[in-house]
Amino acid sequence: MKNFEQISKKIQALTIDNPRQPSNIKWYNIVNPEKKEIAYLKKKFNFKDKHLEASLVRISAQRPMIFEEKDYVFIILHFPVIEKGQVVPGEIEFFVGHGYLITLHDNKIKTLNNFCEYCKNDSVFLESYNLESSAVLLYEILEKLIQDSYALLDKNNIEINKLEKGIFESEQEVVTSQLLILKRNIINIRRIVENHKNIMKKLTEMKSSLVSKEQIMKYYGTLAEHSERIWEFSDTQKEIIDSLQNTSESISDNKTNNIMKTLTVLSAILMPMNLLATILGMNLNPGTYPFSLVIVSMIVMAIVLLIFFRKKRWL
């Protein structure tokens, strides 16, 4: 039996049906929803207008939200995704009710579409296939999305190791630029996942007629732990990148100070010599005593200044 239906260009419907169970789950995956898709949901389901309006791509929420209604739960969550080398939030809206799950998104999060493709062919391996619970299907989707955050943190660790090595080898301008990009991405990850833990803890209170309360708490409690761990890892990465930035700035400042010190020493040596040459070097012929005296005086003055700078530890 076919378990997939392309309702429209933007709406896919996937049925997860275990023959051993009397019911099934319908997953509607909607990409870049517009008024036409919202009208379809309004006609088919009894959702509140404010939740349907919040599902439009052009109305992007600034923070995660969860609303529990009588017949469904509405959730807005953001997940970090890479776009042109920068971490940006990918937003997903979820409607979860008995026997159905609806996801609406802007197609930034490839993991969601990949999981949907996987379910078309191998849904029998899903936990939600065995239990036929939309709450469990939601858990499995969130678990996949959260694993993506771990993958981003792993990439950050690789970049941090490269930068740590490059700070002492590469051009300072290049390293500084890479440090700032990585720091921005880490901050964006932290901003995006900041409230995940609270949302997951609230989902542990979700009610299901098919799954026990203990199982729901176990599933979403695990997600809450993952969210907390991601936050801790990103916090550690932020501290490391701050330390690397300070080290890079110290090296850069030290190089600048060395250059300025060298220029200052050269200026201090050449200025008196130039003054002496100007005063005594007028109308003097090479090989004469006054000319030799000027040359010797300049050399002696340079040596005295060098010894002085050494004693002052300016060199």
Image (cartoon, rainbow, N blue to C red):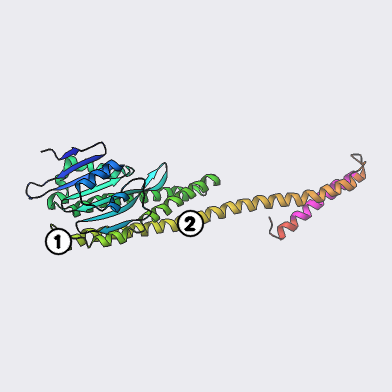
Which residue carries the number 1 mark?
212
Disc 2 crowd, CA 10 A, few/some/many (<14, 14-19, 20+): some
Left or right for 156, reference 50: right
Q: Which mark is residue 242?
A: 2
Is 22 left or right of 198, judged from the image as shown?
Answer: left
Amino acid type, mark 2:
Asp
Residue 299 is inside the magenta segment: yes
Residue at 80% x, 49% y: name it.
271
| Residue 153 rendering spot, x and y as whole percentages | 37, 51
Q: Quadrant of residue 254?
A: bottom right
Q: Nearer the viewer, residue 117 or 34?
A: 34
Nearer to us in this view, 139 or 148: 139
Horizontal arrangement in the rendering, residue 166 relative to residue 290 (left or right): left
Region rendered in magenta: 291-306
Magenta-span inclusion, residue 12 = no
Residue 101 visible to an observer of this rendering = yes
The reply to whether callout 2 and callout 1 are in contact (CB within 8 Å) is no
**For the point 16% across and 46% down, which residue is it?**
125
2 or 1: tag closer to the N-terminus: 1
Report helix, strand or loop for mark 2.
helix
Residue 157 image point, x, y percent: 39, 51
Residue 241 coordinates in the image, percent (x, y): 46, 54
Q: Residues within 10 Å of mark 1 (few under 14, many from 20)?
A: few
| Image x and y of residue 61, in percent | 36, 52
